[in-house]
């Protein structure tokens, strides 16, 4: 009898584990899918576009939001043009929830993204984004001093920019004037990351920093110290630097002055 009870207990435990795995799998499927993405607390529109190699202007247009609009945890965004990919709308709509607008949103007061209920994407977008258009940089500066460790390769994920060797705490500078559109560590593989918008066309990014000295929304001038150099995942001290044109990585050495 005792042996039977032990077997029943073991079967019960196994059932609980399997139920948890299935529930976890279902939840995972609800939080992401082909062509759409669920916003996390540390995300911005720019960081999501950066993660998936998209033009932030297209991402905003597909989701009927302004490029500077606040996005909220739980909000689902299209990663493909829903006009050309109608199945994306169907898949996302099956997993969406009704947005909850709190009093601070209605009054126009600052909103705490972490405590805001989930929002949802709309149907086919018809709104174009209207943002102040900045001029493309006429001159670019090197982000820091040091030995060049590798060159650009669009095909290699870890070489979509250049790596510059340096010392711990070495100054990292903005390569051109612009606005900080991301400052955080929520993008896997980049460590402490800063993204600066220089114009409607160009963004630059500075990864693996030891310390970030600027916050999202700040305007910086070319040459301003924005971070301190830190360690790469290989434990070497370096800066990983990228320039993106309309969301696509380009060779920084084509823009930076020769040295």
Image: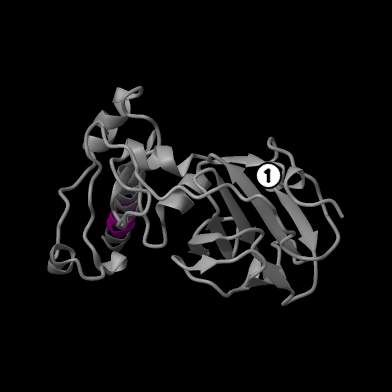
- Answer whether residue 29 is visible to the viewer in this image: no
Label 1's element?
loop
Q: In which quarter of the image is the N terminus?
A: bottom left
> Measured along the vertical axis of the image, is residue 31 above or below residue 8?
above
Which residue is drawn at the image coordinates 57% and 75% (left, top)? 213
Q: 10 Å neighbourhood of mark 1: few (<14), some, or many (≥20)?
A: many
Q: How is the image coloured?
A: one colour
Give left or right: position of 80 versus 172. Answer: left
> Measured along the vertical axis of the image, is residue 223 above or below residue 74?
below
The magenta stretch spans which residues?
8-14
Q: In which quarter of the image is the C terminus?
A: bottom right
Determine which quarter of the picture holds residue 118: bottom left
User: Magenta span has 9?
Assistant: yes
Whole-percent x and y of residue 6? 32, 61
Give left or right: position of 68 versus 125. Answer: right
Which residue is drawn at the image coordinates 49% and 60% (left, top)? 182
Which residue is drawn at the image coordinates 27% and 37% (left, top)? 127
User: Magenta span has 174?
Assistant: no
């Amino acid at each position: 009898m005792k042996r039977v009870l032990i077997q029943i207990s073991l079967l019960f435990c196994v059932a609980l584990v399997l139920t948890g795995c299935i529930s976890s799998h279902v939840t995972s499927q609800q939080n992401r899918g082909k062509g759409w993405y669920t916003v996390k607390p540390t995300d911005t529109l720019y960081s999501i576009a950066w993660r998936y190699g998209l033009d932030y202007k297209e991402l905003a247009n597909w989701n009927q939001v302004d490029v500077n609009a606040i996005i909220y945890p739980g909000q689902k965004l299209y990663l493909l043009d829903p006009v050309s990919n109608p199945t994306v709308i169907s898949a996302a709509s099956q997993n969406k929830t009704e947005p909850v607008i709190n009093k601070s949103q209605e009054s126009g007061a600052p909103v705490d993204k972490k405590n805001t209920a989930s929002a949802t994407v709309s149907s086919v977008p018809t709104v174009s984004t209207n943002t102040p258009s900045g001029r493309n940089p006429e001159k670019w500066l090197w982000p820091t001093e040091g030995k060049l460790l590798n060159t650009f390769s669009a095909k290699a994920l870890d070489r979509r920019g250049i790596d510059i060797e340096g010392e711990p705490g070495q100054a990292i500078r903005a390569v051109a004037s612009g606005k900080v559109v991301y400052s955080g560590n929520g993008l896997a593989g980049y460590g402490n990351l800063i993204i600066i918008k220089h114009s409607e066309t160009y963004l630059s990014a500075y990864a693996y920093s030891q310390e970030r000295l600027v916050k999202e929304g700040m305007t910086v001038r070319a040459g301003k110290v924005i971070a301190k150099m830190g360690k790469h995942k290989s434990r070497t001290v370096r800066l990983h630097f990228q320039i993106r044109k309309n969301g696509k990585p380009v060779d920084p050495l084509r823009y930076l002055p020769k040295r």
